[in-house]
Amino acid sequence: MTDHNDLDTLAAEFVLGTLPAEERSVVATRRNEDPELEALILAWEARLAPLLDEVEPIQPGPDLLARIEKRLDELESSAVSSNPVTQGATVTELTRRLRRWQWSTAVASAAALMLVAILAFQPAEEPQSFVAVFQHDDQQPAFLLSVDLENRQLNIRPVTAEPVQGRSYQLWIKADELGPNPRSVGVLTNNMTIDESALRQYDPELLKAATFGISVEPEGGSPTGQPTGPAIHGYLYPTGEGKSGHQL
């Protein structure tokens, strides 16, 4: 799957758990090698997590399944003793229906959740929510950056990155319109956060085409105004349908 819309659907199905086991295993491996897929999976996880807070879990009585199975066993015993050919077949069918009901209920719940998610988060013609994944080579992502272009607000979240004693992470932006050198967006705090309004001065179209970087600098930030060491890079991708300035 290379089409962005198909990739977004694949990510949604992976998060919802509706993929067959074999395909889910393939996606689980692929997400470590495909930054766009990883970003979409993380975006769907962030989208769907609040839904769990809106639903009160309802559990059936602890003995419900046991009572159903006991009743089926009773019917089966009765059927075998009276007419093992016809009634036994009927009980077997009831047992199959019970198993089918358990499976179809799980699938229906997942499908319903997907429908709610799609309706609730149907993107506009031009998406305003973008995400970038920062990772080195084929390792797990270090940071996840999300940007709301409409309000030009950003949020950065460490995934595997951890604070470095006596050092600071610094976020950079680079775009043709800004000249040949990257510009500092800001230094991450000890809590690995950054000012949400740090991108307010930049035009949304510039942000969509820009390259972002994160480097490890001396505590408090680079003393030169430029990265003093290697940086890991990320590009913004839309979290829904639409077209960004970057294609894999």
Image (cartoon, grey):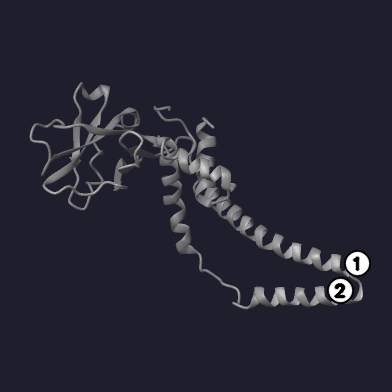
Nearer to us in this view, 195 or 88? 88
Residue 22: tell me if it is visible: yes
Q: Which amino acid type is shown beneath numbered disc 1?
A: Thr
75 displayed left or right of 57: right
Measured as percent of width and height from the top left, residue 211 is found at 29, 29
Residue under numbered circle 2: 79
Residue at screen point 26% across, 34% down: 232
Query: Picture quarter containing residue 82?
Result: bottom right
Residue 120: tell me if it is visible: no
Q: Specify the label residue 86 is tagged with.
A: 1
**Contact, CB < 8 Å: mark 2 with mark 1?**
yes
226 displayed left or right of 58: left
Measured as percent of width and height from the top left, residue 138 is found at 36, 35
Query: Could you tell which of marks 2 and 1 lies nearer the N-terminus?
Result: 2
Q: Which amino acid type is shown beneath numbered disc 2?
A: Ala
In what element is the residue under mark 2? helix
Mark-to-mark CA distance, 2 and 1: 8 Å
Number of numbered discs visible in the structure rendering: 2
Residue at screen point 63% across, 78% down: 63
Residue at screen point 11% across, 47% down: 166
Measured as percent of width and height from the top left, residue 167 is found at 13, 44
Residue at screen point 44% across, 57% down: 50
Q: Quadrant of the C terminus?
A: top left
147 displayed left or right of 238: left
Measured as percent of width and height from the top left, residue 201 is found at 23, 35
